[in-house]
Image (cartoon, grey):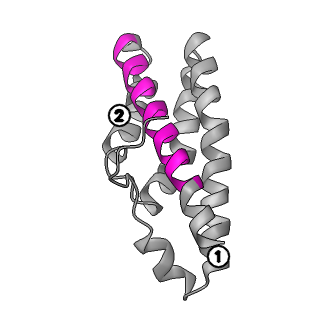
Amino acid sequence: MEDSQEKRYNLENLEEISGGSNEFVIEMIKLFISQSENTIPGFEQAMENKNYKVIRDLAHQIKPSIDNIKITSLMPIIREVEHLAEMENQTGELSSKIMEVNAGLKVVIFQLQAELIKRK
């Protein structure tokens, strides 16, 4: 898995709302990883079936998590995915954006798994 040295996420938000609880941050990271691991194949299957409602719903569900973990590279793209899915006629562009989101999520999952190891 590609691991550019630069972190693609920022946990400041989580640390602030955690009140200093490392356990809380760890649980939120685990939740994000789990959600992302379900979203990636969900996007792929929904795109294959041209199920725009599922794509829109998946994008809508993961958007707050992307915002909370401050994955700034994905923030505008996930909004585009949601918008394009609502329009239901931009299949090529939507497919490209989903591939971009999925690739970004995979890198962040990999990086967050390393973060979990450091925090334990």
Residue 40 at x, y = what percent?
59, 32
> Quadrant of residue 4 in the image?
top left
Give the distance between the C-alpha atoms of the residues marked 2 and 1, in whole angstroms: 30 Å
Q: Residue at x 31, y 45 (%)?
A: 73
| Along the line of sight, the residue nearer the viewer: 103 or 95 | 103
Residue 13 at x, y = what percent?
43, 72
- Looking at marks 2 and 1 on the same chain, the residue that comes earlier in the sequence is marked by 1
Tell whether 112 sits left or right of 23.
Answer: left
Tell whether 86 sits left or right of 80.
Answer: right
| Along the line of sight, the residue nearer the viewer: 73 or 55 | 73
Considering the numbered disc 1 on the image, is that residue within a helix, a strand or a loop?
A: helix
Q: Residue at x 34, y 50 (%)?
A: 5
Q: Residue at x 57, y 46 (%)?
A: 61
| Along the line of sight, the residue nearer the viewer: 84 or 73 | 73
Mark 2 = which residue?
80
Q: Is residue 112 above or below residue 39?
A: below
Kind of residue sitting beneath label 1: Phe
Q: Do the residues under discs 2 and 1 have CB atoms within 8 angstroms?
A: no
Mark 1 = which residue?
24
Does residue 104 belong to the magenta stretch? yes
Residue 47 at x, y = what percent?
55, 17
Magenta region: which residues?
92-113
**Which circle, 2 or 1, is nearer the viewer?**
1
Kind of residue sitting beneath label 2: Glu
Magenta: main secondary structure: helix
| Along the line of sight, the residue nearer the viewer: 53 or 108 | 108
Considering the numbered disc 2 on the image, is that residue within a helix, a strand or a loop?
A: helix
| Crowding at mark 1 (Cα within 10 Å: few <14, some 14-19, many 20+) | some
Does residue 15 belong to the magenta stretch? no
| Crowding at mark 2 (Cα within 10 Å: few <14, some 14-19, many 20+) | some
